[in-house]
Image: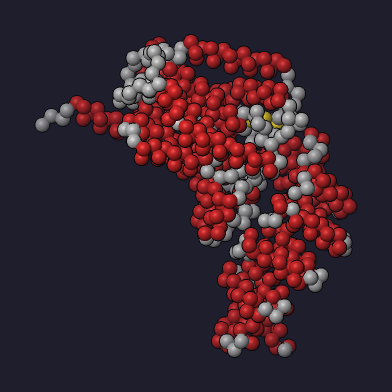
Amino acid sequence: MRIPMTYDLHVTKRHASILAVLLMIALILVVYWPVQSYDFINYDDHGYVTSNSLVSTEFTSDSLLKMFRNDYLGNWHPLTMLSHMLDWKLFGPRAGGHHWTNVVIHIFNTILIFLLLRTLTGALWRSAFVAVLFAIHPINVESVAWISERKNVLSTFFWIVTMLFYVWYVRFPNWQKYLLVVISFALGLMSKPMLVTLPFTLLLLDYWPLGRMNTKQYYKNQASEITNFTLRKKTIPFLFMEKVPLFILSAIFSCVTFFAQKNVGAVLSLQFFPLSSRLANAVISYGLYIRKMFWPFDLAVFYPVNYNMSLWQVVLSILLLIVITVSVCIYFRKLPYLFMGWLWYLGTLVPVIGIVQIGNQAMADRYAYIPFIGLFIILTWGLSDVLKKRFSLKITSIAVLSITIGLTIVSCRQVQYWHNTFTLFSHALNVTQNNSVAHSNVAGELLMQGRANEAMIHCEKALLLNPYDYNTLVRTAKAYELLGENNKAIDALRLAIEVNPGYAKAYNDLCILLLRAGKVEDAMKIYSKAVELNSNKDNLELQYNFGNVLAMQGHYADAIIHYAQALRIQPQNAVAHNNLAILLLREGKTDDALKHFREAVRLQPKFASAHYQLALILKQKGLIEEADHHYREAICINSEYKDIEKKK
């Protein structure tokens, strides 16, 4: 029996789709395979993961509530934090596992982009090439290789899923499918609020390739250029009203993000960075992002704001944007993908283009993760139109293959810079100018290696560029400390606190230096002031260290309060349980002490002193068998406890 041609075509396309997906996965693995041996980056990774007590805590209703109640480093993204918590349960402090999660999500995002465009347009190979560009373009390395950018890859996953649900909804409209659109969008916003522009992007899909807008637009009749399914036209007001629930969610999350960033001092005031400068930086950045798409070299983790932008840069960037926009408008009926892709790029960059300035970076590679999809669509569909008219399939294939190989090679090199913090910021110094953040972070890494003199050179350069960078001031203090100049270290820390009165690390480092200098009362006053600040109430290090100082000074009742606060922040802190138990025992609260000693040895089975103290309490309570067990454990871990018993 002869198989119908339609079946042959279906099988061929299905096999081609599978082949395309396998190629995408292979390319991503080639580029990102080395990250399994890479370190955490000491630039946000500590705040989100390694030093975040909530990430390493047990899964409880209370810990999950905290995740939804608190913001982290000025961002409220509970789903992202939940993913970090899951990673910690699976991989602990092994950075390779955390890196792999980002890579896996990036693989899913790539496949979903392919499926979305394939569903929308029917253009298999063009959809595949857009996905390949997304998979291996060097500008996306930052989003994938940086563990802290989990929020970027995870939110993009929900962005694409929302679009897929939306396509399903417009084909077979009912409220259940629309609810899925709203839910997936909300999940995306809870991963990263940058998704606030998604409702506008759905309107672009309504224009092309869905063709839902009731206009006189004309699509050039090319094979598989538009959707293969027929949709009823809708008026533009209807399409806006249809997305009102999504716009409301966007407005809510925009406000939450703004105030969260403002509370941590990340939003720069107009006095410091005026609106005219922001607009100038925005138009220059739009042009620079396009340049980086075609010339993806000299990429850096941090691009400092240029406060002395030249007029020619601004004018040239404005002219570029005007020329492209006018061209797109001229061809918006004949080549609708130009209009859709260009507005996708312009619109999705708006939240991070710097008009509301968050931090002091001019731009960031990670911000291009979603916006570049629009440019990739323009590039792919545009190349297809040009090449198939003027060149053979062989020439087209060679061009596509050359682009793919070239981007893969450049991305492989870019990934290498993410090996550790030192290589990352050293590279940033090589490819940028006047980069105080890079100097400061290189100094931090040199300090960890004990190279104080070299670190001081970078600290001085950083402070010359930004005299009031409190992170650099703390690193300068550490360099002075290693060089034996404690008084200068204390002065630097006092200045850091003056610049940022809520900076917990500066308080803690200052108190440690004061204690070493024998200024116990001064240290206690500073600790007391520090823990009273709302920003520091949940700082584990401050609460725990203040408890230690209070205990050493005999203020046991106050020390108990701060140890308890430390355990509220990090219930898995075995040493805090042990120290609290010792003080409770002093206060005659034997049962409470017993509970905390038990928890200490459960969390840290090799905790000899906790085993020994537990044995003493159990013996007093007549629980001889259990007491003997803990006594044997203590001796097995540390034989000195056997000598202590002999002396009794």
Q: Is residue 270 above or below residue 76?
A: above
At x 73% / y 46%, what residue is drawn?
444
Quadrant assignment, res 577: bottom right
Quadrant assignment, res 582: bottom right
Residue 437 rendering spot, x and y as whole percentages = 72, 38
Q: Is residue 277 above or below residue 328?
A: below
At x 52% / y 31%, what residue is drawn?
197
User: In the current view of this chain or complex, which residue is farthest to the left?
Assistant: 1
Split into 4 quadrants, where in the image is the N terminus? top left
| Residue 465 appears anywhere in the view | yes
Say whether residue 605 is left or right of residue 522: left
Marker count (numbered)? 0
At x 59% / y 45%, what residue is drawn?
76
| Residue 208 appears anywhere in the view | no
Residue 490 rendering spot, x and y as whole percentages = 85, 52
Q: Is residue 509 above or below residue 454?
A: below
Split into 4 quadrants, where in the image is the C terminus? bottom right
Say whether residue 622 is left or right of residue 374: right
Quadrant assignment, res 547: bottom right
Q: Report the coloring of the rendering.
A: secondary structure
Residue 513 rendering spot, x and y as whole percentages = 83, 57
Say whether residue 548 is left or right of residue 368: right
| Depth order, front residue of 419/211 | 211
Residue 429 rendering spot, x and y as whole percentages = 70, 34
At x 70% / y 80%, what residue is drawn?
588
Say whether residue 219 is left or right of residue 540: left
| Depth order, front residue of 247/431 | 247
